[in-house]
Image (cartoon, grey):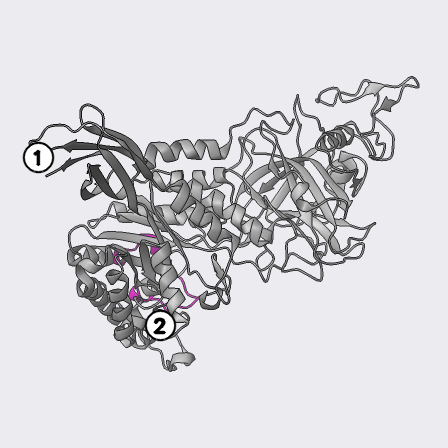
């Protein structure tokens, strides 16, 4: 959960929401909408002629009541859905658990409430073929700033929870055709004394499909909480959307099971639990074979040009074509100290691409060019490619703008001596139009790609100031959309004119994949289209990926986001990947890391993946993906090495056939190819590209 989330404490009733803190089904019944039959949770059952719209879930007892056979060790429940759920979990060899809230689905759903002026609720028919019968539709009616601005929350009032207790949430979700977008829901559990936490251990955020899909949500509490102080909730504040929620259960296993033993994520085939879905990793591996490998043919001849039969051939990969990179702390890189040695070693061992975290930013570059140049030279000397980050970024507090420009933006900046700002649009325009070509021309061919403008959707201050509005949060442009501002196109035109042939021009922004935040995505897409249609055009799109546990995406969600941006005919980069979250178990981070990296590597439009630093003590949030303080390796690093230097690394050998030919398939990149006959050896460095490569080796 993001720090500062105000949703943690119980909300009070207000005049705004039509439902408020009233239980969902109770409020719906009050207006004549509760039409979803189901068990009441008190042992009573629906009459035999009640049509629930579901499948048969129980047998009639001799006394006319509904009998439900309990799973081994589980409590007897009258609710057929809960009985079936207990049987499903028992079949997974899980010990008996206790149902929280109530012993029936309707009463459990009744314990949850939606409290927001930005959302409406209504009853919804579950439909045929599902094992549950109680569901509600939540319609978010307006843009929201935070996911927790709309939350469906159920406080547990009758039991405590202890540190180490393991629970399993179960919920069925569906995306109705009426939804403005594919809805997003985030699973959250916590108590009122630990509002900055989320004890959900995996699958924290999902985008359900059009069919009912059951999700298992494992939880492990890190603290004690008294009755009435802890809860489970769904964050639904992702802008206008509609989502159906049903089949809700919470099962308490106490300390009788580890969280790793619980099922997690969506049940393939929908809420009924059938197993006819596709495996994300199988599909990713197939895409990787299609898009990241190519055929390499080696033809060996003797001094007279005749084919050599039986020549030994070795094919050794030396470098990936795909960019695997990191952000570099330029100052630390250049320190001739023992601390700097492992830093330099790991950068060169792990990556083929780099970006300076700060020192190509405008103010840093103008005030400390020696450090920027030193780090640039070092990166190039190691044979790494270098991206330019960034020509223009309007974030004053990040020290990205020179003080004279800040003053002309009309912004007071006491930390850097700007106490007398005076808005000067012409000066801002002049300085920005000078700086963009100046830094690009200065580095020339040394930098292969430039982010010309960074985070325009969130930081439009330079655009505002150049168009006559102070670059402050309380000022806005009435008749001009910053993401489609003419000066934005002018900056890119100046960059294109200054850049050497082959230099790529890019944009970069956050909340564009991680999240996701629909309004930001829509703004970013408009910016991409605007620039792509401009005189300069647009080559690449950077997707910052600063994840925490609450914003982690499934492989399916990642693919959906990548497909969305790739549809604009641009190349994609994962530019700022990290997983900063102290409450997120490192092993779970590593699992997510593997899924994410394999998914983005499998997408044909993605060219680069960059982690945003490698060491905790040099990381902007003190939680880098690969190394803790003292260079202690984190589990995600092992996953990275396993994928990049093992699973996706080609080493092959064999002998030529009668035609003097040896063929293999390898990951695209640079190779050393060697042929040996009777102790005579000949080698050549070759590039294996998308269309395949044939190399001819002639023995002397």
Give the residue at x 59% y 62%.
4
The relative height of residue 254 versus residue 453 in the rendered view (above or below) is: above
Residue extending furthest toward the front? 678
Span colored in magenta: 465-487
Confirm or deny contact between disc 2 and disc 1 (CB under 8 A).
no
Give the percent coordinates (x, y) of residue 334: 32, 72
Is residue 451 shown in magenta? no
Residue count near mark 2 (Cα–Cα under 10 Å), binned few <14, some 14–19, many ≥20: some
Compute the Cα span from label 2 to label 1: 54 Å
The relative height of residue 691 versus residue 64 in the rendered view (above or below) is: below
Camera sees residue 376? yes
The image quarter in which residue 168 lies: top right
Give the residue at x 46% y 65%.
620
Q: Which residue is mark 1?
A: 303
The image quarter in which residue 533 lies: top left
Is residue 476 shown in magenta? yes
Give the percent coordinates (x, y) of residue 429: 25, 66
Magenta-colored segment: predominant secondary structure: loop
Give the percent coordinates (x, y) of residue 513: 44, 47
Give the residue at x 60% y 52%.
148
**Mark number, residue 331:** 2
Give the percent coordinates (x, y) of residue 639: 47, 48
Quarter of the image with the N terminus is bottom right
Question: Helix, strand or loop at disc 1?
Answer: loop
């Amino acid at each position: 959960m993001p720090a500062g989330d105000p949703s943690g404490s119980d909300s009070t009733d207000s005049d705004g929401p039509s439902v408020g803190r009233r239980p969902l089904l109770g409020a719906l019944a009050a207006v004549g909408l509760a039409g979803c039959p189901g068990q009441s949770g008190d042992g009573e059952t629906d009459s035999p002629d009640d049509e629930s719209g579901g499948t048969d879930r129980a047998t009639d007892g001799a006394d006319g009541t509904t009998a439900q056979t309990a799973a081994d060790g589980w409590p007897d429940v009258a609710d057929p859905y809960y009985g079936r759920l207990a049987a499903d979990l028992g079949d997974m060899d899980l010990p008996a658990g206790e149902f929280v809230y109530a012993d029936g689905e309707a009463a459990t759903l009744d314990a949850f409430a939606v409290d927001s002026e930005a959302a409406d609720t209504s009853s919804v028919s579950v439909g045929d073929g599902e094992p549950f019968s109680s569901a509600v539709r939540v319609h978010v009616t307006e843009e929201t700033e935070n996911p927790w601005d709309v939350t469906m929350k159920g406080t547990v009032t009758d039991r405590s929870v202890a540190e180490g207790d393991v629970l399993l949430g179960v919920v069925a979700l569906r995306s109705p055709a009426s939804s403005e977008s594919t809805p997003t829901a985030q699973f959250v559990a916590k108590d009122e004394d630990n509002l900055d936490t989320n004890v959900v251990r995996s699958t924290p955020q999902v985008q359900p499909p059009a069919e009912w899909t059951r999700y298992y949500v494992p939880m492990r509490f890190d603290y004690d909480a008294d009755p009435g102080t802890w809860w489970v909730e769904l964050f639904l504040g992702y802008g206008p959307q509609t989502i159906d929620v049903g089949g809700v259960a919470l099962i308490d296993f106490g300390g009788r099971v580890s969280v790793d033993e619980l099922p997690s994520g969506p049940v393939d085939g929908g809420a009924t639990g059938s197993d006819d879905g596709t495996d994300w990793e199988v599909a990713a591996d197939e895409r990787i074979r299609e898009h990241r490998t190519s055929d390499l043919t080696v033809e060996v001849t003797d001094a007279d040009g005749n084919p050599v039969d039986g020549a030994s051939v070795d094919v050794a990969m030396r470098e990936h074509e795909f960019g695997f990179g990191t952000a570099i702390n330029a100052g630390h890189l250049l320190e001739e100290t023992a601390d700097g040695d492992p830093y330099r070693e790991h950068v060169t061992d792990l990556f083929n691409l780099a970006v300076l975290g700060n020192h190509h930013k405008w103010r840093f570059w103008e005030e400390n060019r020696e450090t920027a140049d030193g780090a640039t030279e070092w990166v190039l000397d190691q044979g790494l490619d270098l991206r330019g980050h960034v020509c223009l970024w309007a974030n004053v507090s990040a020290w990205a703008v020179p003080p004279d420009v800040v003053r002309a933006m009309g912004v007071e900046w006491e930390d850097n001596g700007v106490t007398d700002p005076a808005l000067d649009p012409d000066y801002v325009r002049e300085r920005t139009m000078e700086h963009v070509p100046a830094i690009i021309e200065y580095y020339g061919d040394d930098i292969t790609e430039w982010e010309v403008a960074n985070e325009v959707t969130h930081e439009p201050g330079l655009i505002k100031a150049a168009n006559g509005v102070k670059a402050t949060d309380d000022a806005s442009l009435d008749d001009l959309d910053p993401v489609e501002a003419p000066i934005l196109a002018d900056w890119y035109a100046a960059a294109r004119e200054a850049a050497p042939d082959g230099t790529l021009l890019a944009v970069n922004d956050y909340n564009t994949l991680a999240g996701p935040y629909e309004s930001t995505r829509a703004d970013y897409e408009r910016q991409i289209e605007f620039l792509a249609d401009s005189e300069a055009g647009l080559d690449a799109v950077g997707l910052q990926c600063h994840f925490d546990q609450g914003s982690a995406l499934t492989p399916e969600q990642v693919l959906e986001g990548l497909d969305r941006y790739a549809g604009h005919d641009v190349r994609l980069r994962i530019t700022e990947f990290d997983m900063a979250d102290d409450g997120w178990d490192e092993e779970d981070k590593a699992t997510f890391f593997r899924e994410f990296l394999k998914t983005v590597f499998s997408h044909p439009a993605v060219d680069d993946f960059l982690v945003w630093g490698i060491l905790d003590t040099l990381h902007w949030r003190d939680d880098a993906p690969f190394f803790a303080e003292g260079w202690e390796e984190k589990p995600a690093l092992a996953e990275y090495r396993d994928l990049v230097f093992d699973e996706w690394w080609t080493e092959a050998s064999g002998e030529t056939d009668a035609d003097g030919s040896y063929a293999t398939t390898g990951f695209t990149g640079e190779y050393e190819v060697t042929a040996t006959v009777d102790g005579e050896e000949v080698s050549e460095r070759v590039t294996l590209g998308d269309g395949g490569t044939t190399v001819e080796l002639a023995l002397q």
